[in-house]
Image: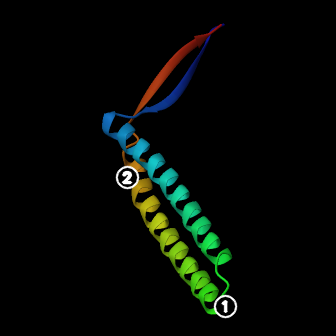
Amino acid sequence: MATVVRTEKRKRGIFGTLVWWMFLAFNGFMGLWIFYVIKFASEKFDHTADAATQAGTAIGGTVAAGMLLSLWLMGSVILGLIVALTRGKTVTVERVVE
């Protein structure tokens, strides 16, 4: 006796695929940017001997990383919503299994 297996898939269009890759590229770029900001701030902190300069570097690096994290969050939410809205239409694939 044969049974029919139905599978539902979503097929993205060209615009949906472009938005998906933009979302991935944005997240990768922001991750690298935050990594290098933290690395740069820690290198500046290590190369100074003055306590006031070290405190300023630590505070400035923390503020910069916090601003980048908030920018990353806002961008990911906006692009994530666009990615969710461009999922594409549902395509049902039927397969007969014996």
| Colouring | rainbow
Residue 29 picture location, percent across and down: 48, 53
Label 1 vs 2, first from the N-terminus: 1
Q: Which residue is label 2 attached to?
A: 82
Across and down, in percent, residue 11 comes to 41, 31
In the picture, the quarter occupied by the N terminus is top right
Mark 1 vs mark 2: in front:
1
Give the amino acid type for the residue marked by disc 2 in the picture.
Ile
Residue at figure coordinates x 48%, y 75% from the top left:
67
User: What residue is shown at x 58% (from left), y 82% (from top)?
Assistant: 57
Q: Which mark is residue 51?
A: 1
In the displayed structure, 80 sits above or below 52; it is above
The answer to which of 91 and 33 lies nearer the viewer is 33
| Residue at (60% x, 68% y) in the render | 38
* Residue furthest to the bottom: 52
Other-residue count near label 1 (Cα within 10 Å), few / some / many at <14 / 14–19 / ≥20: few
Does residue 97 appear to the left or right of 86 in the view shown? right
Q: How far apart are marks 1 and 2 (CA)?
A: 46 Å
Q: How crowded is mark 2: few (under 14 residues within 10 Å), some or many (20 or more)?
A: some
Kindly state the secondary structure of the residue where label 2 is placed: helix
User: Splitting the image into 4 quarters, where does residue 97 fall?
Assistant: top right
Say what amino acid the circle numbered 1 marks: Ala
Q: Where is residue 90 in the image (x, y as percent from the top left)?
A: 42, 33
- The residue drawn where x is 52% and y is 69% is 69
Q: Where is residue 8 in the image (x, y as percent from the top left)?
A: 50, 30
Residue 46 vs 21, above or below: the answer is: below
- Could you say which is closer to the camera, residue 46 or residue 87? 46
Q: What element carries label 1?
A: helix
